Image (tube, rainbow, N blue to C red):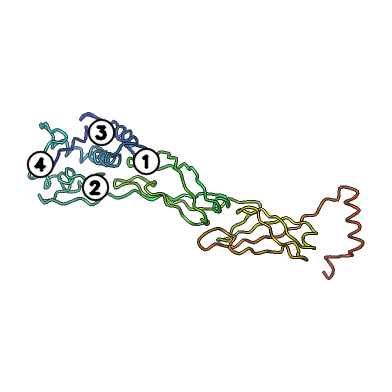
Amino acid sequence: MEYKDYYQTLGVAKTASEDEIKKAYRKLVRKFHPDVSKEANAQGKTQELNEAYGVLGDAEKRAAYDELGRGQQFRAGQQFRPPPDWGRNHGAGMGGAGGSSDFFADLFANLGGGRRRQAPPQRGDDSHAKLAIDVIDSYQGASRTISVTVTEADGYRSDRNLSVNIPKGISAGQQLRLAAQGQAGAGGPGDLYLEIEFRPHPRYRVEGRDVFVTVAVTPWELALGGEIDVATPSGKLTVNVPAGSQTGRKLRLRGRGLPAKDAGDMFLLLEVVLPPATSAKGRELYQTMARDLAFNPRAGD
């Protein structure tokens, strides 16, 4: 197997302090992070950095590694074989660094002289957050840029801007999975899950896949009926209002809810709006209605 010069990997001297090693690792792991680096082998480079820091960032592992090279002139890439009793003397409790090369396995995962591969490094934790969208975003689909804060492998917290595609028909409570955008780990980052919720809207309300739309109508449109134009999340619709309708009546439009595979329905809630009686003509019309219609909505109370 090939010798790994962990000091060279991190670009520090063998006399580097713990703080210098940590700073060098943080700088390089941010530079080669797969989400920002344009290097062809950014993922492999990141694994090398994690392995090097997993050894040099741990006092016990670093001491054992330094003892191995004391008085030797090993070079990175040089063919190398650990001493016969290395696993027996240094293997116990030395596994778990952030890497999985043969070099690391032979140095720190041999027990009693027999080769034993270390367990695969664990992925980072998944992250969870809420993403508020408008009802119209579900009807049309959308793209949003969000900012998230993640914890890197060394504990350093960094901010990332992520582009999120919102598919048509998505409902509140559904989750969007962004692979490898969660917390960092030796085996790679976890995932980010975004739970969808709808922003409040003055006219639109969502329940499951059904959408409720408040529609302002005039008294004569309710009383006489006829076609009216209604603005909805899916665009303007022409709807027939049955004659003799009352405020609060609910008109159902099948399949006009959220456009999922099993689309919901749209419900139009009719709400009468009275014209103002601020002009002489307006007051005269109301007086005529009061006299001729002789209607008392509270009769029988």
Nearest-to-viewer mark from 1 and 2:
1
Mark 2 and mark 3 lie on one chain; the one further toward the N terminus is 3
Residue that mark 3 sits on: 10
Mark 4 and mark 1 lie on one chain; the one further toward the N terminus is 1
Residue type, numbered disc 1: Asp
Nearest-to-viewer mark from 4 and 1:
1
Nearest-to-viewer mark from 4 and 2:
4
Residue type, numbered disc 2: Gly
Q: Would you say the residues marked 4 and 3 are in contact, meaning their CB atoms lie under 8 Å apart?
A: no
Residue that mark 2 sits on: 96
Q: CA distance from mark 4 to mark 3?
A: 23 Å
Residue that mark 1 sits on: 35
Which class describes the residues within 10 Å of circle 3: few (<14), some (14-19), or many (20+)? many
Labelled disc at residue 81:
4
Rendered image quadrant of residue 269: bottom right
Q: CA distance from mark 2 to mark 3?
A: 19 Å
Across and down, in percent, residue 15 comes to 21, 29
Q: Secondary structure at mark 3?
A: helix
Q: Is residue 180 left or right of residue 196?
A: left
Across and down, in percent, residue 242 comes to 74, 65
Across and down, in percent, residue 139 comes to 56, 53
Labelled disc at residue 214:
none
Q: CA distance from mark 4 to mark 2?
A: 21 Å
Q: Secondary structure at mark 1?
A: loop
Q: Is residue 82 left or right of residue 240?
A: left
Q: Secondary structure at mark 2?
A: loop
Q: CA distance from mark 4 to mark 1?
A: 36 Å
Residue type, numbered disc 4: Arg
Mark 1 and mark 2 lie on one chain; the one further toward the N terminus is 1
Q: Nearer the viewer, residue 9 or 82?
A: 9
Mark 1 and mark 3 lie on one chain; the one further toward the N terminus is 3
